[in-house]
Image (cartoon, rainbow, N blue to C red):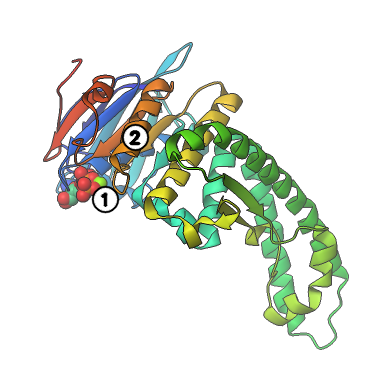
Amino acid sequence: MKLNQLSLYNYRGYNKQDIAFGKGVNLFIGDNGSGKTNLLEAIYFLSLAKSYKTEDSNLIKFNQDFSRILTTVDLIDKSYDIKIILSKNKKKIILDGREIQKLSDYIGQVNVVSFLPEDMNLIKGPPKNRRYFIDSIIGQMDRNYLIELSNYKSFLKQRNDLIKKLSEDKNPDMTLLDIYTEQLAKAGEKIISYRNNFINKINLELKSIYPYLANNPYLFEFKYLPSIDSSLEGTLKENYRKDLFVRTTTSGPHRDDYGFLMDDIDAKDIASQGEQRIMILSSLLAVTEIIFHYKKQRPILLLDDVFSELDTTRQNKLIHFLNKSHLQTIITTTTTTNINQEILDDAKIFNVKNHFIRGNKHE
Ligand SMILES: Nc1ncnc2c1ncn2[C@@H]1O[C@H](COP(=O)(O)OP(=O)(O)OP(=O)(O)O)[C@@H](O)[C@H]1O
Ligand SMILES: [Mg+2]
């Protein structure tokens, strides 16, 4: 999947901007505040029809009434046009000339895998960051997972509501709790199986990607850390007393976690900033391969400010790797002084200044 060209009109600080992307690595170089992240955000918007950091109204250029994103996406055998118009209280999406009525019918048309500076919190942050990350990737590959997840969540809510009621009862009748627990366990087993499957796949891909980028002797493995690793139903039932005391369901897939392990030790305890960055980047690259196996289309890779904290060798290795991959990659950076000219020669370079983009090669 490739973005052919993109036109922004009144999007964030952009006035009117046309960009013709290259098929491989596209490097956007510019100072702080020049509009690099805003550009990536516009591409991200094409994928999920929302920004990852703010509501739609902030995307419209200050003092303007609407903003517009236009693009053509090329797939292997066809291409399609997307037009998004954001006005104060309305979002209109037009796919190949036809207006989308239900957002859920649109989401998934453009597959994007992104690295944002805040993704560094994947290793350091709380388990919910890792759960959200993995859930959104599995969901991007397989919509059924999102349906299963939403089933699980509604059973969980139902069970938690009941637990609250029962906890106020002196002689609680557990019959209904048994039924709700069995329902939750059944739905949870499905989630666990999707997650196990995904973790096996990502580890397989990491074996070839990580050693090249990391350039170190360590083994990086993704580990699934389910909150219950024996029978789900059995354990949920054993925990009745605790759940009633705490007034919520204290274990299950909603409390699962994942470890980024470096030689079997949690990376947050031993890996440096740059090493953690490489681990996350390798994981994202592994994800692009897995998505390709499922969808037969490679997603577009967005890398925001990816070079900071990486040494010269690893910056060069990363670009070299991406040049050789079949991914369309859009990278932002404030400087390319550390990158070899011959590696840069394979990329398409753009300069960004005050929300104005100029391509200085292959135009
Ligand atoms: N709706 C808007 N209208 C006009 N300007 C906006 C709007 N939203 C954000 N901006 C401007 O965009 C700028 C930030 O742009 P952006 O985040 O893309 O910078 P950047 O090039 O990624 O910088 P850095 O290198 O620091 O990450 C801010 O100066 C902000 O004022
Ligand atoms: Mg930025």
Nearest to the observer: residue 199 or residue 38: 199
Q: Quadrant of residue 327?
A: top left
Task: Provide residue 357's location: percent of width, then percent of height.
Answer: 16, 31
Residue 228, placed above or below residue 313: below
Note whether residue 183 is visible.
Answer: yes
The amino acid sitting under disc 2 is Ile
The residue tagged 2 is: 43
- Which quarter of the figure is the N terminus placed in? top left
Q: Secondary structure under badge 1?
A: helix
**Residue occupying image coordinates x 59% and y 40%:** 138
Q: Report the amino acid beneath label 1.
A: Asn
Q: Is ligand 1 closer than 8 angstroms to the Cβ of mark 1?
A: yes
Please indicate whether residue 38 sits to the left or right of residue 194 in the image. Answer: left
Residue 307 percent across, percent down from the top left: 30, 42
Q: Image point 46% across, 31% down: which residue? A: 111
256 relative to 49 in the view: left or right? right
The x, y position of residue 84, in whole percent, is 33, 33
Quarter in which the C terminus is drawn: top left
Q: Earlier in the sequence, mark 1 or mark 2?
A: 2
Task: Identify the disc placed on residue 58.
Answer: 1
Give the label, 1 or 2, closer to the camera: 2
